[in-house]
Image (cartoon, coloured by chain):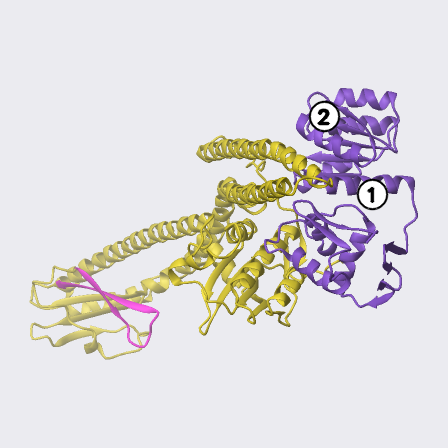
Amino acid sequence: MSSTGTLDQLRRSVAVRLSLWFTALFAIGFTAIFALLYVLLGRQLEARESEALQLRLRQYADIYEASGVQGLGERIDEDSATPHVRSLFVRLISQSGNVVWARVPPDWIDQDVKRVAVPDGWGGWSVRQMYSVRVPHDQQQDLAVVSSLLSDGLLLQVGRSTDNRSTLLEPLRRTFFWVGSAAILVGFAVAVVAARRATRPLHQVVETARRIINTGALDARVPMPARDDDIAELVQHFNTVLDKNAALLRSMREALDNVAHDLRTPLTSLRGTAELVLSQPGVDLSARDALADCVERTDEVLRLLRALMEISEAEAGVLRLEKSPNDLREITRQAAELYADVAEAKQIKLALQEGEAASVVVDTVRTRQAVANLIDNAIKYTPDGGAVNLRVYLENGDALLEVRDSGPGVPEAEQPRIWERLYRGDQSRSQSGLGLGLSLVRAIVEAHGGKVTVENAPDRGAIFKLRLPATAALPLTK
Amino acid sequence: MRILVVEDDAKIASFVVKGLKQEGYAVDHAPDGDTGLALTASTTYDAAVVDVMLPGLDGLSLVKRLRASRAELPVLFLSARSSVQDRIAGLQAGGDDYLTKPFAFAELSARLQALIRRSTRVPEATRLTVGDVEMDLVSRVVKVADRLVELQPREFSLLEYLLRHPGRHVTKTMILEHVWDYSFDPQTNVVDVLMHRLRAKIDPEKTRIETVRGVGYVIHGNT
């Protein structure tokens, strides 16, 4: 999972993408320049070769005109003997295409003169003054041939073996390959470093955003980059947005605190005054009932207020969580214990199935409350004599609690709505409760980065699933 | 026993003062922190009930100053703020206990009594007896009218809590916190269910444990 994660991260990294583009363009440019150089150099070599050969061809033609085949033969022998002159190939070809006279270089492996092609046609072959023939059996050498029409109608061909151009340029190509590879590698490394440096403020923006989302640390800010460029501007604006956001949340939290305080103070005195009278003996019975109603209703309003506050805070992302390492199974066990007597009174079998420990880092009190609300909900909807099964297990790096009841289940259409504040399905109207239980569960779980879902069991009853991010098993300290 | 109540809301102060007086305490009331501080300088108190949010000198600062001069006065904070941080801040300022508004007066009274008992160092009893109900905390034996009664751990815990507060009201919230260590509303009334079971075992005629609607439960000695 982590390797695909890293790959995915690399794929999404702007720095890596920029570096790859830079390297690709660099490689293309480098290759193009080399190719141009290579071609130009080749042309240059060919031109010089051709010039020298043409000169010799004109000389030999003049000698032939002056002193015939014999004179030409002597001159060739003479030329071949001098050092630094490469072995020459000379022949005379009649109009019918037969070889009249030929001199083949001694180092030429294939002595069969006929295998050197006659240039395309008489007269009309000005198209190419010189052409190369690959010397058979020897890949390292080429034969460059030039021709000239003599006054007696014979064709004089003068050829000289030359180094194969590709062989000649081989060291250049090899050098290019190594230098090019090294340059591309170094270029890539430099590009990665440069892009990383350039995008570091972006990473810090991402880091900060993530930290705020995960921990709710509203005071986290992105450090300003040293250079004053467009990224610095982005960072500055981002920080400004964070400032405004934090101020908004602070004022919201304060507003909620004030509302709570302003409501609690009169309710406290209302409740206290009524309670004080109730705790004295000798008060008229009907007055007692009225006062007891006052106390009970006040408690109800306060419960509602508390739940609404928690849900609002959780949804606004300002709920203060006291996170500590916990075991979801242990939390579930404790919550189930709270309902053991209630379940027994309804003859409901409330059981926590055997399972492994599921390490989570959560606010103990609130998570216990969420779990308790789910169990409470399950017991409420399970008819007498039914069963509520709890199971805690790990799945895909999450800790899961499954609460399965044997009640009527939740109609498909109502499933997304049961989490809404004060929503009550048709079936729940007869039941007591404030309709905030499940919204509070969702608010608490989502504040922890988890999820709650509901589905119906294939046979009967509803299955509520509470999912929290699991941590690597920690030794729990009691 | 003289108790100082520092609370700015007149109505809350009124019922707290009245209630404490009914319980037999001598009570002084200060509407703000400065008055409260002045009173502690001139009078010796056995305990103080202090609201955290006060005009002028706030509750936390008041207790910090108190601690600087007279360290052993037990202080119970009252606050409309219920978060753990607020609670910790209260205890760090030198408070001995912290009660969130709204509270049941019965709970305030029980906690205050516990604070005073702790500060006067009354040794913990190992036997609790109220009327004909006896409980041995060491051997965990419970006798009702000299007849041995078998109790489950939660039933035992509930009865112990009632016996520790004879003749006093005990609220459902207090029971929930003591028996299950829960501080939130479990929606379904789990306390009623447990009380029902305990009564079936030790008080089928409902003469020993009285239910006071709107207040809570109380165990009586003279049945």
Badge 1 vs badge 2, beta-carbon distance below 8 Å: no
Q: Is residue B78 visible?
A: yes
Q: Which residue is mark 1?
A: B114
Image coords of residue A136 (percent x, y): 28, 76
Q: Is residue A136 above or below residue B211?
A: below
Q: Nearer the viewer, residue B68 or A68?
A: B68
Q: Quadrant of the N terminus of chain B?
A: top right
Color used for chain B? purple
Color used for chain A? yellow
Q: Is residue A27 left or right of residue A155?
A: right
Label 2 lies in what chain?
Answer: B
Q: Which residue is mark 2?
A: B58
**Secondary structure character of the magenta stretch overall:** strand
- Residue drawn at x 67%, y 34% is A273
As shown in the figure, which amino acid type bears the numbered disc 1?
Answer: Ala
Q: Is residue A2 visible?
A: no
Q: Is residue A147 magenta?
A: yes
Magenta residues, as a range? A129-148
Image coords of residue A372 (percent x, y): 60, 57
- Residue drawn at x 82%, y 22% is B39
Q: Is residue A447 left or right of residue B51?
A: left
- Residue drawn at x 59%, y 43% is A293
First in sequence: mark 1 vs mark 2: 2
Secondary structure at numbered mark 2: loop
Q: Residue A39, located in which quarter of the rendered image? A: bottom left
Secondary structure at numbered mark 1: helix
Image coords of residue A13 (percent x, y): 46, 50
